[in-house]
Each structure stands twice: as structure tokens, then as C-alpha cells.
Amino acid sequence: MGPEPEGPVRQAFTSELDQLRLQVEVMGVRVDENLERMREVLSTGDEALARTAVAADDVIDAMNVSLTERCHDLLLREAPVAGDLRFVLSVLRVLAELERIGDLALRVVKLVPDWALMRDQPATFDILLSMADTAVEQVRAALRAWSTRDLSIAAAVADERPMEIYAERFSRDLLGIDGPEAVTAAVRTLVAGRSLDRIADHAAVIGARVRYMLTGDSVHLTSEIR
């Protein structure tokens, strides 16, 4: 005999979980859109696009608050157990990581007043552009793991450290920044580099959380300790 059909209460709860999963995906799309704006602002210094990104981040923050409250309501009202509990707790963590990614993207965007100073240091500026590409791709992979529940993608995002290839050269070239506004250029470049590095870190945490959600093995949460 197959499993018994779900009763109406369980069906309603399952529907709520499905809606929650889809709404996290929508928030992920909004974050991805702002990451693309961040990458474009970093590449071109487009101040109008920077203002658009700032406004879009307010929408992301509002979504985070709304969905977080919805998770808390589900936990209090339904008292989920086992896989359902793991899913809701994972949603809370993914929401937090997406919100942090959005904040870090905004930190890069808000460097636009000093964009020319960063651009005029081609060695470090080229590295920043490559780091931005890597950060965006890592977040997209993490979001793909979430939407498809693909364990192999989640594991790859959680375990890879793609930013390490930039670390030594970035540090060396940062020390080589010169000119009358070298200090300001170096500080702004450092802020951008650290923000991009952290975006990739938060993507790894999402990957680790998806892996835990799918396997139930808490060992897979080690990537969250950073």
C-alpha cells in the first residue's frame, strides 16, 4: 500500500511551505538583480544606477522582514518537526544570508563617489572586476541549489573557496597604489575587495544550509562558522 493521502490540515501546511520556498526564490531574484547593478556600477561608475540599487535594497530588506515574520509565525502556530522544521530553520538562515549579501552589494555601490580613484589604479581595479564576477556567480549557484534542491551544486558552493586565487595578488597590488590620493584609493579598494569576498562567503553559507536541509547532517553546517 502507498502512503496515506494528506489530510486538509497537512495539505494547507504543505502549501504554505511551498509558497515560502517560492518567496525565498523571489527574494533571491531581487538580490541577484542588485548584484548585477553592483557589478555594473563597479565597472562604469554609473551614479544613476547606484541610486536605483539603493532603492532596490529597501525592497529586499522589507521582503526579509516579512518572510522572517512568516517563518516565526509558522514555527509558533504549527510547531513543525523533522524535515519541515529543518526547512523552516533553513529558510530563516537563507533569508539572513541574502539580506547580508544585499547589504554588502550596497556597500560596494556606495563607493561610487570615489569610483574614479579606484579605476585609476588598473592593477587592483581589474582584480575587483574579476572578484565581482566570481561573487555574482557564487551567489547564483547558491540560489540555483536552493531552487532545484541539487545536493551536488550545494556542496560545491559550500566547499569551494574561489576568492582565494585573488588574495595574494590583491594584497600585493594594494600596497603598490600610489599618487596624491593613494590612501583614499587604497581604502576604497580594500572596502570593495572585502565586501566582494564576504559576498562569496555568504553564498557558501547558503550552499551549506541547503546541503543540511537536504541531508539532515549537521556536520554540513561547518561552512557557516566564519
Image: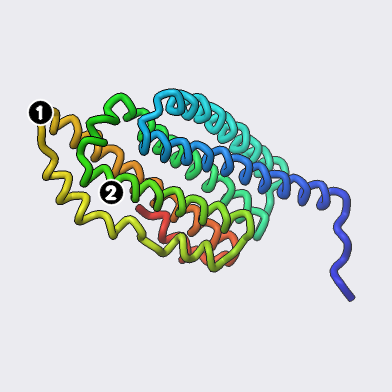
Point out residue 203 in the picture as x, y percentages from the top left corner: 45, 51
The disc, 2 or 1, on the residue closer to the chain's N-terminal end is 2
Confirm or deny contact between disc 2 and disc 1 (CB under 8 A): no
Point out residue 186 in the picture as x, y percentages from the top left corner: 18, 37
**Which residue is depicted at the point 50% across and 30% down?**
57
**Which residue is depicted at the point 44% across and 40% down?**
100
Image quarter of the N terminus: bottom right
- Under circle 1, the secondary element is loop
Residue at the extreme bottom of the image, as rendered: 1
Circle 1: is it few (<14), some (14-19), or many (20+) Cα within 10 Å?
few
Name the mark on residue 180: 1
- Under circle 2, the secondary element is helix
Q: Position of 105 compared to 77: left or right?
A: left
Q: Amino acid at mark 1?
A: Pro
Q: Nearer the viewer, residue 121 or 148?
A: 121
Q: Give the residue pinned by disc 2.
A: 127
Q: Position of 134 compared to 148: left or right?
A: left
Q: Nearer the viewer, residue 92 or 110?
A: 110
Point out residue 208 in the picture as x, y percentages from the top left corner: 48, 59
